[in-house]
Amino acid sequence: MAVRAVRAVRGATQIDADDRDQILEATTELVTEVMARNELTTDDVISVVFTVTPDLTAEFPALAARKLGFHEVPLLCATEIGVPGALPRVIRLMAHIATDRPRSDVQHVYLRGATALRLDIAQ
């Protein structure tokens, strides 16, 4: 039997405007991709921290995860540091998961304009 370890999965996406529907749609896409690429169920997810750049205030990204069935998973939303020149309108996540995958096999997900954040691993 494989040993399950706690791993962190990172991800990010970018939206066009501070719009509730865009926040929910992009977060849904991001969470769905993280789950699919890492072959996860909500039972594998320990917790998820969502952050948004200071220019996004229309909705909590965690609401999208709740709508996807993350009812028993602790979720937290926070605001990123407002660094001058940083990529705007970005939603990030860091999910803590229980998995038998080695760290090198964890699939981090960067979508839309957020691919610029991690060109080394963006899809």
Image (cartoon, grey):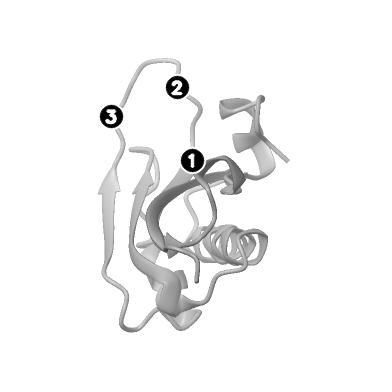
Q: Please report the residue visible at 50 percent of the width from the left and 71 percent of the height from the top.
A: 1
Q: Is residue 35 above or below residue 68?
A: above
Pointer 1 with pointer 2, Cβ within 8 A: yes
Q: Please report the residue visible at 40 percent of the width from the left and 68 percent of the height from the top.
A: 45
Say what amino acid the circle numbered 3 marks.
Answer: Ile
The percent position of residue 26, horizontal first and vertical second, equals 58, 58
The percent position of residue 12, horizontal first and vertical second, equals 53, 44
Report the residue marked by disc 1: 90
The percent position of residue 98, horizontal first and vertical second, equals 40, 64
Task: State the quadrant of the C terminus.
Answer: top right
Which quadrant holds residue 96?
A: bottom left
Report the residue marked by disc 3: 81
Question: Which one is nearer the viewer's eye here, 24 or 117?
Answer: 117
Instruction: Indicate the secondary structure of the residue bearing disc 3.
Output: loop
Say what amino acid the circle numbered 2 marks.
Answer: Ala
Q: Tell me the CA gap for discs 1 and 3.
A: 12 Å
Q: Is residue 31 left or right of residue 56?
A: right
Label 3, residues with CA under 10 Å away: few <14, some 14-19, many ≥20: few
Q: Tell me the CA gap for discs 2 and 3.
A: 9 Å
Q: Do we see residue 16 in this rendering?
A: no
Q: Tell me the CA gap for discs 1 and 2.
A: 9 Å
Q: Is residue 51 left or right of residue 15?
A: left
Report the residue marked by disc 2: 86
Instruction: Indicate the secondary structure of the residue bearing disc 2.
Output: loop
